[in-house]
Amino acid sequence: MSVIDQLNDTKTRAFARHCYEKGSEEQLRKAAEGPADQKEMKQWDITEGEWEEAVAAALADKEVKDHPPGD
């Protein structure tokens, strides 16, 4: 089961899926290191914590996809 699928909040999960589909691993890593994007938070109606959780989940799933265990 993906990390994104384990998110409880539907808006956070939807934003995480968006991040996963639209962002590269490098973009997600950079986003996770910086401050939450206020514009995206407003657009997706999520809190700063939810934004951070979504980006982290998207990055975790992207890392597994791009670098599978045993690879």
Image (spheres, helix red, strand yellow):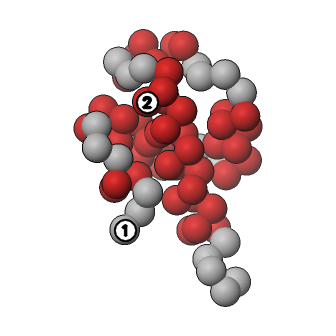
Mark 1 residue crowding within 10 angstroms, few (<14) / some (14–19) / many (20+): few
The foreground one among 62 and 23 is 62
At horizontal 50% and vertical 49% (from top left) the residue drawn is 57
Q: Residue at x 35, y 47 (%)?
A: 7
In the image, taking residue 28 as reference, residue 52 lies left or right, namely left
| Image height of 50 relative to 8, above or below | above
Vertical order, 68 against 35 (above or below): below
Secondary structure of residue under mark 2: helix
Q: Position of residue 34 (x, y in %)?
A: 71, 27
Badge 1 marks a residue whose secondary structure is loop
- Mark-to-mark CA distance, 2 and 1: 20 Å
Residue at the disc numbered 1: 1
Can you tell which mark lies on residue 55? none
Left or right? Give the position of 54 relative to 69: left
Residue 69 makes an appearance in the image: yes
The x and y percentages for residue 21 are 48, 49
Determine which residue is flagged by label 2.
50
- Residue nearest the viewer, comparing 46 with 18: 46
| Dot 1 amino acid type | Met
